[in-house]
Amino acid sequence: MSSSSVRPFELRCEYQVNPLGIDTPAPRLFWKMDAGASHNAKQTAYQIIVNNGAKWDSGQVSSNESTHIAYAGLPLASGERTEWKVRIWGELDQPSEWSETSFWQMGLLKSEDWIARWISLPSTRPVSALQSPSYLRRDFQLTKPLLRATLYATARGVYLPYLNGKRIGNTLFAPGWTDYKKRIAYQTYDVTNELIAGANTIGAIIGDGWYAGYVAWGHRNHFYGTEPQLLAQLFLEYADGSSDTIVTDDSWCGANGPIVYSDILAGEYYDSRIALAGWSSPGFDKDKCRPVKVEKEHDTSILLTAQIDPPIRKTEEIPAKSVSRPMPGSYIFDLGQNMVGWVRLKIQGAPGTIVRLRYGEMLEQRKSLYVDNLRGAEATDTFILSGSGIKTFEPHFTFHGFRFVEVTGAIEAPTTNAITGIVIHSDTPKTGSFECGSPLVNQLVKNIDWGQRGNFIGVPTDCPQRDERLGWMGDAQVFVRTAAANRDVAGFFEKWMVDVVDAQSAEGAFSDVAPRAPNPPDGAPAWADAGVIVPWTIYQVYGSRQILTSNYSAMTAWIDFLVKENPNFLWLKRRNNDYGDWLSIEADTNKDLLATAYFAYDAWIMARIASVLNKQNDASKYEQVFENIKQAFNKTYVAEDGKVLGNTQTSYLLALRFNLLPDHLRPLAAKHLVDDIKNKGNHLSTGFIGVGYLCPVLSDAGYSDIAYTLLLNKTFPSWGYSIEHGATTIWERWDGWTEEKGFQDVGMNSFNHYSLGSVGEWLQRYAAGIDNDPDAPGFKHFFLHPHPDRRLGYVTASFESVHGTIASHWEYNGDDILLKMVVPANTTATITLPNAERTTHEVGAGTYEYAVKADN
Ligand code: BGC
């Protein structure tokens, strides 16, 4: 291979391509290495230059690292834009060509950089009612040729920014959900091309959002404040080197418009007869505008930080599949997919016609809309027509979880074209794919991704449809590895860990939900532990040491709190809302045992994290804590024949997955687990907590055949049962709907909860065999150890790691299994073949093909 045939590509900064608004002083840089078809390609050195070397020239650095390279040049100023490129060396002496030039732009680094003031439009309605979003605006003149214009903006509430009559950017529900009493994210937009010489207008619509609108259950609003506010600062850099700043202050004015209210849970009420045309363009009638209220001082204890997670965006449109008319005046549209977002309605009718859209996940008796499981979420959009001709409606500040939409009102019979589903979620790029010979499993894979998309909305939430939608920690920790197998969730979880730490109690207890809501409280086993499990998992998959360093003291506070409260190494105290193996099927795992197992797992992870961060004393301390818990666990819950207290599947799964048993008992415990599955007619009985460990533990113990049996089951309880009954997302409960009983209790029955979809981890790591090596995070070195099974026929899977695309394929061909695997440049892998000998190969980058004798 000639060295010049290597090439760095896909440059990223802080996981993003050409990001704006970076406020960490040493942004992390990433690239991938292209080495064509050459084998064993490795980077031996790199050189980064920033602003042609004026800011930073790293010089030639001997290193095979190409991810998380921290900027180490001259200090960067607020708003500064830097261009960077990289070249790399392979095996030969001469460097590659320089990469294409990328850039990043700094955000506002100091609180003094914010000269804008928070503004709001005093409401004309009683505070208790749902508020009408405000349209805030100001005119300004552009007098000189412009070099660049950058808008920094945020809200207490949610906002949509406008310039000269046009929506800026495509971010939805900005600034996203954080604990607004502690920090608020701001967004940065390049608006150079939106400005014109002469008169311009800047504006924003602001709504209640999580800040002031309904959150969780019980029709509770005003969690953080009563009045939505806007903060915006437009920085104008002129060609002559001078600059200007336009900020929110008393020169702004505001009005209420056609959006009567728009609330995440309640829905939107839009009266298009209330015209506010031209509100964000120059020349708008001043008389329609009321003065704004200006907050005098900045409360600097509330941090303004650049948004670091991928924005929430529209990512797909879904045409309606069919429309039916269960009764006169009511039309039900079927999108064919349980999805999250809203619909675009195109409709015609007399002025004043009220059209109501009601959203639901299921149908009752295959006919009418089923909404009982939405509990207190009204999930209703109302649109009042203003004139003749076809009108289009889309809500602004609400989202719904639904497959079906009921349209009512005095309208003519609509065709399916009247409704289009608009899918929204945190725009995490798809990085994993998995396809196999079983249509059932392929549908399961789709359902897992739809569950993830619909519930990753700024924070990982439990469900998108009912009055809840909270950042439940237990759900997040069981699903995080699957999430990372499926999409790039590095930035998403780095951001959420900030919410998790913000929600930690003064004593050190991680909460049950993050951002924290008034209740539930904190400390529930398997929920609070997300504070340790999530950073460790993100480090494993993406190699982010930063998620470990920045959360280290929070994590040690948590484990030290547990040890202090439970000096006998059984987690018996401070469990608060002890949920246990939530929603298991007639198999209650002992809660003391479950808690103690997680206690041990936390200590085990902490020992590893401490050692990664070179904190050897901590590492030995937590290793000892782990050993102590393990001993107490065995003494209290494990019998000599390998039986674990309660004999539930989850009790074995925890003991095996968290390495709590002595070696000689592991096979016995695995056998008891398998016996229980067989006694249940080859069925699982696990709830949220056990389910993700089920297939991995079975495979590790040599029972992949049983894992596949569970995977392919169609009878209750199984993933297949829901799919056989039409599921297009993962259900909250195995028995959300059954042939015998119909719908489960409406008090808690979501049809879009991702937790039971945590089998996605096993599909990638075991079925396809693309598995991370804990000692070489970020898939720098990884395992390819597929577990083929004839019942699936074939698997074709890929994973886009921070280094490049890993691929794994196997298929049965008579008595043989054919395999094809791809290892990206600058990484190495251990391939273990699924033959009787489990032959291994240590390989570098390249494409590898094998044929082995099938033993099943
Ligand atoms: C949520 C869960 C959550 C649980 C706590 C439910 O209401 O939907 O997913 O983890 O409460 O047990």
Image (cartoon, rainbow, N blue to C red):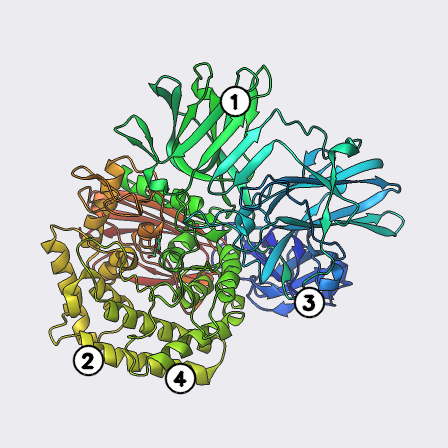
* Label 2, residues with CA under 10 Å away: few <14, some 14-19, many ≥20: few
Residue under pointer 1: 346
How many numbered marks are there?
A: 4
Q: Earlier along the polypeptide chain: callout 4 or callout 2?
A: 4
Q: Secondary structure at mark 3?
A: loop
Q: Nearer the viewer, mark 2 or mark 1?
A: 1
* Label 3, residues with CA under 10 Å away: few <14, some 14-19, many ≥20: some
The answer to whether residue 240 is left or right of residue 612 is: right
Please tell me whether residue 649 is drawn above or below residue 639 in the rendered image.
above
Q: Nearer the viewer, mark 1 or mark 4?
A: 1
Q: Earlier along the polypeptide chain: callout 3 or callout 2?
A: 3
Q: Give the spatial CA distance, label 4 vs label 2.
A: 21 Å
Toward the viewer: 101 or 18?
18
Q: Name which residue lies at 53% across and 63% down.
A: 498
Q: Give the spatial CA distance, label 2 vs label 1.
A: 67 Å
Q: Which mark is residue 635?
A: 2
- Mark 2: which amino acid? Lys
Mark 3 near ligand 1 (CB under 8 Å)? no
**C-beta proximity under 8 Å, tags 1 and 4:** no
Residue under pointer 4: 621
Residue 443: name its quadrant: top left
Q: Give the spatial CA distance, label 1 vs label 4.
A: 64 Å
- Mark 4: which amino acid? Lys
Residue under pointer 3: 58
**C-beta proximity under 8 Å, tags 4 and 2:** no
Instruction: Confirm whether residue 78 shows in the render.
Output: no
Q: Earlier along the polypeptide chain: callout 1 or callout 4?
A: 1
